[in-house]
C-alpha cells in the first residue's frame, strides 16, 4: 500500500491536470544509484505494462512495477511548504539507511548499487 497525504495529492492532481497527454497517471518506482544504493522515481506516465500493480490513492491512479513494490510498500508521500519553496517528502518504512538528501535509500535485504555522484 502507498500512502499519499491530502496536501501531496492536491499538488499531484494539479500537476496531472497540466499534462497535455490524456489518461496520465502517477508512476512510482525505484532505480539503482544514489548515495545509499537506490533512488526514488516519481513521475507521470501513460504507458501501462503487465508488470505493473495498479492502485487508487486519494482518487488518483498510482502505478508501481511489481519488482519495485517490495521496496515501496508502506511508502508515505507528503508535500511540505517551507517559506517560498516546498517539496515532496518521502518516508519509507523499508529503508534502514538514507542519505542526507533524502532521495536515496537501502533496505535490510538489498543494498542496491551506490553511486555517490548522483547525490
Image: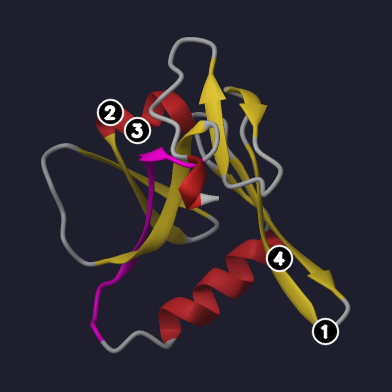
Query: Farthest top residue?
Result: 109
The residue wearing badge 4 is 7
Label 4 or label 2, whichever comes before in sequence order: 4
Q: Which residue is mark 1?
A: 84
105 vs 42, left or right, is right
Report crowding for label 2: few under 14, some 14 to 19, many 20 or more residues within 10 A (C-alpha): few
From the viewer's side, name the closer residue of 63 and 113.
113
Spatial CA span between label 3 and label 4: 24 Å
Kindly identify the residue that appears in the image at 16 percent across and 54 percent down. Answer: 48
Q: Is the Cβ of the residue at disc 4 closer than 8 Å to that at disc 1?
A: no
Determine the secondary structure under disc 2: helix
Where residue 60 appears, as percent x and y from the top left, is 44, 61
Start and end of the magenta stretch?
Answer: 21-34
Q: From what the image shows, is residue 21 above or below residue 28?
A: below
Describe residue 113's horizontal placement relative to residue 102 as left or right. Answer: left
Label 2 or label 1, whichever comes before in sequence order: 2
Local secondary structure at mark 3: helix
Residue 42 horizontal/vertical position (percent): 43, 57
Q: In front: 109, or 17?
A: 109
- Magenta segment includes 33: yes
Circle 3 sits on which residue?
68
**Gap in Å between the C-alphas at discs 4 and 2?**
28 Å
* Disc 2 target residue: 67
Task: Give neighbour class at mark 4: few <14, some 14-19, many 20+ (Cα, 10 Å).
Answer: some
Q: Residue at position x 38%, y 30% from top?
A: 69
Q: Furthest-front residue in view? A: 117
Task: State the image coordinates of residue 89 (x, y, percent, origin top left).
Answer: 68, 53
Mark 4 vs mark 1: which is more N-terminal?
4
Q: Residue furthest right?
A: 83
Main SS of the magenta part reads: strand
CA–CA distance in space, label 1 to label 3:
33 Å
Amino acid at each position: 500500500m502507498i500512502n499519499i497525504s491530502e496536501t501531496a495529492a492536491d499538488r499531484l492532481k494539479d500537476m496531472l491536470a497540466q499534462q497535455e497527454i490524456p489518461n496520465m497517471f502517477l508512476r512510482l518506482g525505484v532505480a539503482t544509484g544514489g548515495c545509499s544504493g537506490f533512488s526514488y522515481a516519481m513521475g507521470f506516465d501513460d504507458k501501462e505494462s503487465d508488470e505493473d500493480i495498479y492502485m487508487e490513492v486519494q482518487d488518483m491512479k498510482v502505478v508501481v512495477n511489481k519488482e519495485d513494490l517490495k521496496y515501496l510498500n508502506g511508502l508515505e508521500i507528503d508535500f511540505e511548504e517551507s517559506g517560498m519553496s516546498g517539496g515532496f517528502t518521502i518516508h519509507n518504512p523499508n529503508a534502514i539507511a538514507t542519505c542526507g538528501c533524502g532521495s536515496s535509500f537501502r533496505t535490510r535485504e538489498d543494498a542496491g548499487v551506490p553511486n555517490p555522484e548522483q547525490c
